[in-house]
Structure formats: structure tokens, C-alpha cells
Amino acid sequence: MADLSIDFCGIQSPNPFWVASGPPANTAYQADRAFEAGWGGTVWKTIGDPIINTSSRYSALNIGSQRMVGFNNIELISDRAPETNFREIAEVKKRWPAHTVIASLMTDTRENWHDYMKRSLDSGADGVELNFGCPHGMCERGMGSAVGQNPDVIEAIVGWVMEVAEIPVIVKLTPNITDVTYAARAAAKAGADAISLINTINSITQVNLDSFVPEPYVDGMSSHGGYCGPAVKPIALNMLQSCASDPDVSVPISGIGGIGQWRDAAEFLALGATSLQVCTAIMHYGFRIVEDMKEGLNDYLDSKGFASVAELTGKAVASLAKWETLNLNYHRVAEIDYDSCIGCNLCYVACEDGAHQCIDLVDPEGRGLGPGRVPEKAIPQVRAVDCVGCNLCALVCPVDDCITMTAVDRGRDPMSWKQYQEKLASGTMKPIPAHP
């Protein structure tokens, strides 16, 4: 079996799966339950001046029978006293010395940052995470994403923290920003040991069409909240890779955003994460989901011949590049496996109405069918010569691997858009004619 243990900026953890700072990481009781279930670490719910929360505070995006595809919250940081939180961190760390406990912090002045850092050290926490990402409630007070959206402020505050830091410092970044790499660079420049991303995305998930009040409902009003869950995973992966590939960042990254299964975890690791934080999936299914996540990741690492998590980390980072570098002469076409085709013809509809009209409906004998002549047993047939390889038919097909994309050698040398522009400028190539 592969070794799931990790070294995250000097912090040892039995596996990369950490409970993210949020409702599942609010108390010592929850930390104990998480570690009993098999989680490698927990990032405590953010500690600061206690706040007063609203009721209600959650809403969700459901798609068909799938619940909580996207999750929205207007909950703020811990509503418990700092003394209580730091005392419980100390208790948990004593009971679970081999597991990772990170104190998440949010405050304002230099003096308060120094105080909270010293209290984190005294509690026995393995490290701290500076919450520069909360997009609601706290940003109105000059904290959270109000800090994370300003690289100069990030650099200043991280600098304050590093003046007294004796344990690793992780900076949690907001996705509510034009380019997250500027924030990541600022954190690294100021001396942060690591970054984590993403925090939640500003959102409104739904509007009640009877009351005309968005959810969550608070006495006839609502507010924008923080969006998370499976729906944000593509955004998180993009920002993760951007930071992992940036030479001016070059610090370990804790990946957050839509992780709920081992495949999600493997993708985050491949795009540069070293540790993984999970919140929404725990709120949906409970702490025991980590059992399948650990088993699945272990099996995957074994199947690839990887001896450890470290061998997977960053494997896919270099395969992402600017669009201008992609080979314009690479070509793929769709192929249909008729043994598994169920005859729904969704590929035909999608191609005909939403793509490039290169799938025909034919009868079982292969005769073409014109408009208005679509018998019950018509089957789709790809016109390979016209197929642009867009993938849409394969994506909409309800049968796994029924439609596959196959590379076709058209006898053309590789050429990127950047190379094409250079050849045009030098006069060694004429413009490619536009499609009629």
C-alpha cells in the first residue's frame, strides 16, 4: 500500500485529508470524531472576536435529484470565545499528538495578530491559517476577503504575523479576485510558509418566487453568501494550478473546494496540492466519508505504481499552458460504439442544435434520413470528415464510453496559434481561410 502521510511545510500528518475550517471544525468534540473516523488533520473554525450569527444561514443549489450540488452560507467565524477555542485545541492536540491541528485566525491590528499567534503557539497547534477569504460579514469589518483582495494589505499583515511566528503560517486566499496569483505572491513574499485555496465564492443560490426573498431567509431579507461544494471544484482547480505553476509563489498549497471523493482528491494533488481540506461533503454526509476517500486514493496510487502521495503531487501542473501554445493541427473525431448505444439520439440533437451538424440519423440499413423522416429505430452516424472534435456528443451521451474521441493524423506538422502568428508576420505562411 502507498504511504498516505504527508509533510506540509514541516507539518507531519498521517494523511492529506483535513477537515476544513468551518462548521465541522467548531469544537473539540467534532475534532475527536473526525480523528476517530480517520481524518489526518483539522483546521479549526476561525477564531476571532466572537460574533452573532443569523438564523437561517444556509441555502443550496439542487439539480434534479442531486442535493447540495452548490452550497451557500452566510455563517461567520466562531461564535465562541477565543479562550474556549484555544483551550480545546490544546486538549485535542494532547489526545491526538500524531494528528494535525491548525488554528484558523482572523483579527485586525498588529497587536492582535501578535497576540493570537502567541496563543496559537501556547495551545500546541501545529500551525496557523490566516483567514483572508471570508466573503461576507467579516469583509464589511475590514477583514476576510477585504484583506485577501488587496495584495499590499496581505503582504503587510503576513509581515506582522511572521514577526512572532514560531510555527508554520498558511494564508487562506479568496477566489473573489481577478487573479489569485497576485495575492499568492504577496503572501509568499511576506514569508508565509504555505497558502490554502479556495475560500468560498460570493453567491446567491436561489430566489423564493413567492416571497421574492433570496435564500437563506432572515426576517424578510437575505444577503450574498459564500458558495462551496461540488459546483466550485473547477474554479478551485484552476486557481490551484495557477498558483502551483507560478515561480513567484513556490510554497506548498493546501487544496480546498468541492472535494468529496477520492478522484477529487487525486485531481487536486495532481494539480499541485499537498494537503486537502474538506467541509461541504462532511456537512452533507458526515465524517465517515474519509474511509472511502483514503481507500480510493490508496488504490489509485497503487495502480499507478506511486509509493506515496508526494509522487502524485504536481504531476499535472506542467500540462496546463496558455491557449496560444496548443497544437492547432491536432485533430480528434467522435466514434460511436453501437454495441452500447441505447438509441436515445441525444448526441444527434446536441450536435445538430448546439454544435457543428456533423452527426446524421440513419436507418439500420444505413440510408440517410431527411427532415421529418425519423423512424423510431434511427441511429446516429458521425460524418468524420466534418467532425471538428468538439467533444459535445461524448459529454451528453448517457452511456459511459459509448462515444469516444479518437485522434486522426491529418499529415500536418504541429503548429500553435503563437507559431501561426509568427509565420504570418515573417511571410512564410498565408492566412488560413475562414470557414464558409
Image: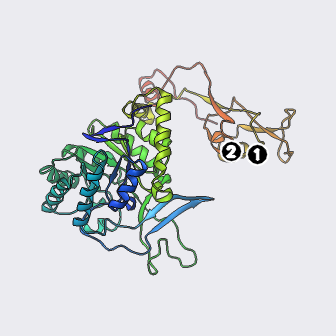
Task: Answer few, some or many: residues within 10 Å of disc 1's Cα (few below 14, many 20 plus, some between 14 and 19).
Answer: some
Q: Circles 1 and 2: CB distance less than 8 Å?
A: yes
Location of residue 251 with respect to 23 vertically, above or below: above
Rendered residue at 45%/36% (across/down)? 323
- Mark before the other along the chain sequence, 1 or 2: 1
Of residue 169 and residue 432, the one placed in the foreground of this image is 169
Tell me the element at label 1: loop
- Residue 433 visible (yes or no): yes
Identity of the amino acid at label 2?
A: Pro
Residue 117 left/right relative to 378: left
Residue 89 left/right relative to 435: left
Tell me the element at label 2: loop
- Residue 179 visible (yes or no): no
Which dot marks residue 344?
A: 1
- Which residue is label 2 attached to? 398
Quarter of the image with the C terminus in it = top right
Residue 239 left/right relative to 117: right
Of residue 216 and residue 31, the one placed in the foreground of this image is 31
Residue 28 is situated, as x and y percent measured from the top left of the image, at 32, 60
